[in-house]
Image: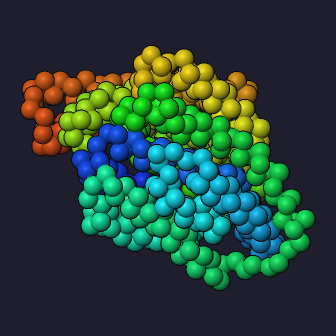
Amino acid sequence: MSTKKNAVYNVAYRMFSVFLPLVTAPYLAHTVGTEGVGLYAEAWTVSELFCLVGMLGLADYGVRTIAKVRDEREKLDRTFSGIWEMQLLVAGITLVLWLGYVFLAAGAEKTIALHLTMMSVSCLCSFDWCLMGLDQFKPIALRNTFVKLAAAVCVFVFVKSRNDLWIYGFVWSLATLLGNLMSAASLRGRVSFRRVPMREALTHLKPCAVLFISVMAVSIYRKMDKVMVYSIAGADQNGLYENAEKIIYCLSGFISAIGTVMMPKVSHMWKMGEKEKILRHIDRSMELILCMVSALAFGLAAVADRFAPLFYGEDFRYSGVLMIPLAFTLIMIGFANVIRTQVVLPQERDSIFVKSVCCGAAVNLIANTCLIPFLQSMGAVIGTLLAEMTVPLVQYLLLRKELPYRRYLGYVGIYMAFGTVMLLCVRGLGLLLREENWLNLALQAAAGAAVYGVLCLGYWKKTGKNFRELNR
């Protein structure tokens, strides 16, 4: 399947994983208020941390490993079987630990946490890593579309008050489990399970554990933020931060979706020794990603203060203030993602990934500890900005002699300049359209897209840019 089609399917997969909960977010915000949203965010965040432990670093290691053996059926079957046996062991232990947390350590969120148990159960049968490694993104996208739509309908039907928060958690965790069970059927005919010795299965544990260090480090500054805001500033501030960060997470799904498609492709190219082709591929990918994320970052920053109260309600107006600086993390995330998925991980240079995200996590933890007590949720925003800046900076220090960073930074400058022009135009239009409503917001968004599009098309035509080779 072509890279273009895989990218389309994977963007759909990522969007349906985060977009439909986003659709239900305004309904939940009006139904349970800032405190309810903050309480649910605490339970969901802790559940996600346990799921990350259960899956170790399979989201990266599994995709890369399967991609490298996908043309050798016997080796593919054995590799898949060994990885899954290792997964069952780790995820099973994590499930027991999760139940211990729910019954012995959970606080006010205990009831919600109990109904999120199927999230941990789903780790036992998550095969997305195998399907992605085989370049099979269509089955993942289709089953997510069906399951998430059904979950969204259930939320609107059954969640009527704050007392129904456990239903909200139950619905989404059940959807995750059902989606993973459906993906197992998609593997039929593509790979077969063969019993392998546990010693062989455990050979996958060490490289997974190395990548897991990176996964946990990322979680510190993408998930532990909410835990720290909840603990230090309270549920109300956590609710405001949760809804601001949720929009950023949704938009960053475009970045991770494209990166996930590129990683198995580039991993296979590295195995075939196509170095020159890979470098051209990275260059085109970097420019395309920076073009996209600059549009998203500056566009969101231009309308966030109007979007938040319209989307979430007046109580969440401050979420719009938080979104403005958070939006610019998209540029840093996009830059770092290209280096990670097309240089570091395909070459199995996992230590670079580990060092960069661990440095980011350390910066975030220090900043949060210092700033949240004084600035509350805005302190977490600043900590996230500093962390996301740290990751590509460390990558640069470790790879500056191997990659044409000056050219990449040139792309950053060009598309940020286009984004700045767009932001000024959108904000200027906002001065004329003073009333806050969806029509005026749509007009601002359309005007911004038109300005940015014209600037990009003019630049591409003048420089003769061509992104078609990314599809080959």
Q: In which quadrant of the rendered image does the N terminus lie?
A: bottom right
Q: Which residue is more in the foreground, 22 or 340?
A: 22
The answer to whether residue 253 of the structure is visible from this angle is yes
Which percent across, then down, holds residue 47? 55, 52
Horizontal side, residue 224 vs residue 304: left or right = right
Horizontal side, residue 2 vs residue 353: left or right = left
Q: Residue at x 73, y 60 (%)?
A: 93
Rendered image quadrant of residue 438: top left
Horizontal side, residue 96 vs residue 182: left or right = right
Q: Is residue 470 above or below residue 408?
A: below
Q: Which residue is more in the foreground, 181 or 327?
A: 181
Furthest toward the bottom, the residue is 189
Which percent across, then down, holds residue 425? 22, 26
Q: Is residue 197 above or below residue 462?
A: below
Q: How many marks?
A: 0
Q: Residue at x 42, y 44 (%)?
A: 39
Which percent across, then down, holds residue 168? 38, 59
Q: Residue at x 87, y 68 (%)?
A: 198
Q: Is residue 102 above or below residue 79?
A: above
Q: Residue at x 72, y 32 (%)?
A: 355
The answer to whether residue 332 of the structure is visible from this angle is no
Q: How is the image coloured?
A: rainbow
Q: In which quadrant of the rendered image does the C terminus lie?
A: bottom right
Rendered image quadrant of residue 35: top left
Which percent across, then down, holds residue 405? 62, 27
Q: Which residue is more in the foreground, 146 or 441?
A: 146
